[in-house]
């Protein structure tokens, strides 16, 4: 199964809801547009985006006489894809680069670091991993396993060490080894804990001051968290000034629309999406492909 197929499978919940709407066989009337807007909101896309896209699509449908399900779906996918902010810089390919991964426990930060390290190394990039999650049990061991799998060195300290000092050590080692891509895994933080968020802000500050390369702070979001993911993203962005997003677990029960909502509300690009467990399943985000899978515009309709 290819990446596009896995993405379509993972986003089946959103697509099925839209399929019911498009296949009712009724007129494209006011009720249709109201139902479309409601369906988009229920898919976690968010009220603001849902209303704007629905209004734009209704105007386009009237001008171009779009009446069939295939035509409407293709137009809807294009409208949704156009809402995503463009990526100005990809911190994983535009090197030298240091990336700090933040997010709550369970979002997939450590796994994402390992996958990105493996991919970058296979493309000839000199990668170094840093383990600044010094609190979670087995976090360092998990990162070291990924380091061995990716054949990338991992800089760690003992459990309970100051995370900011670990970042300092990682950057020193990066200079010694001429590493052009530095990936630092941080401890999971509950977005509702102000003390922990302040500590993470210190980690970001120390890293930015010490680094002799651009530093990006990337939030890893579990797509299955739905609207709770949006509140997480807002808190992290307010505290840390996030540069972009990685959305994981789009191969499971995720509605998928939350990626649209977070990216739009916070004006943040999505760098990568996870559509499976393998290293190859962490893919560069393609807005058009994502939205086509979300609404089913490439299916035989």
Image: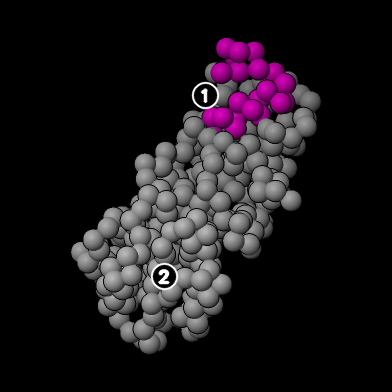
Q: Nearer the viewer, residue 117 or 288?
A: 117
Based on the picture, tell me whether residue 248 belongs to the magenta stretch: no
Q: Residues within 10 Å of mark 2 (few under 14, many from 20)?
A: many
Q: Is residue 132 left or right of residue 17?
A: left
The residue at which mark 1 appears reads as 56
Q: Is residue 131 above or below residue 247?
A: below
Q: Is residue 289 above or below residue 301?
A: below
Q: Nearer the viewer, residue 155 or 253?
A: 155
Q: Residues within 10 Å of mark 1 (few under 14, many from 20)?
A: some
Label drawn at residue 201: none
CA separation, marks 1 and 2? Answer: 45 Å
Main SS type for the magenta part? helix
Question: Does the rendering let one see residue 75?
Answer: yes
Please state, as top left, top right, bottom left or bottom right, where the C terminus lies in the image.
top right
- The x and y percentages for residue 49 are 49, 37
- The x and y percentages for residue 52 are 49, 30
Region of the chain picked out in magenta, as a range: 60-80
Task: Identify the residue at image location x=58%, y=21%.
Answer: 58
Q: Are marks 1 and 2 in contact (CB under 8 Å)?
A: no
The residue at which mark 2 appears reads as 129
Task: Identify the residue at image location x=40%, y=48%.
Answer: 90
Based on the picture, tell me whether residue 63 belongs to the magenta stretch: yes
Q: Is residue 93 left or right of residue 260?
A: left
Q: Is residue 58 left or right of residue 220?
A: right
Task: Identify the residue at image location x=76%, y=24%.
Answer: 26
């Amino acid at each position: 199964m290819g990446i596009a197929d896995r993405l379509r499978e993972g986003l089946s919940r959103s697509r099925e809801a839209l399929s019911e709407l498009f296949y009712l066989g009724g007129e494209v009337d006011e009720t249709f547009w109201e139902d479309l807007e409601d369906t988009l909101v229920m898919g976690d896309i968010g009220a603001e985006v849902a209303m704007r896209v629905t209004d734009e699509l209704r105007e386009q449908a009237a001008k171009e006489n779009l009446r069939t399900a295939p035509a409407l779906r293709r137009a809807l996918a294009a409208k949704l894809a156009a809402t995503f902010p463009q990526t100005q810089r990809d911190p994983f390919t535009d090197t030298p680069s240091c990336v700090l991964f933040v997010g709550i426990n369970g979002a997939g930060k450590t796994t994402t670091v390992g996958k990105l390290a493996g991919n970058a190394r296979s493309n000839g990039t000199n990668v170094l991993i840093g383990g600044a999650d010094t609190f979670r049990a087995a976090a360092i061991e998990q990162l070291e396993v990924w380091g061995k799998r990716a054949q990338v060195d991992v800089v760690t300290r003992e459990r309970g060490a100051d995370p900011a000092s670990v970042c300092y050590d990682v950057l020193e080692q990066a200079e010694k080894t001429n590493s052009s891509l530095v990936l630092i895994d941080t401890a999971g933080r509950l977005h509702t804990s102000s003390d922990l968020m302040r500590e993470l802000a210190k980690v970001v500050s120390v890293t930015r001051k010490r680094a002799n390369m651009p530093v990006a702070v990337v939030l890893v979001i579990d797509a299955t968290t739905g609207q709770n993911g949006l509140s997480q993203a807002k808190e992290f962005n307010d505290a840390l000034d996030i540069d972009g997003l990685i959305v994981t677990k789009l191969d499971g029960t995720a509605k998928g629309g939350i990626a649209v909502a977070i990216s739009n509300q916070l004006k943040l690009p999505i760098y990568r999406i996870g559509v499976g467990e393998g290293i190859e399943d962490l893919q560069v985000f393609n807005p058009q492909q994502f939205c086509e899978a979300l609404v089913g515009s490439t299916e035989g309709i």
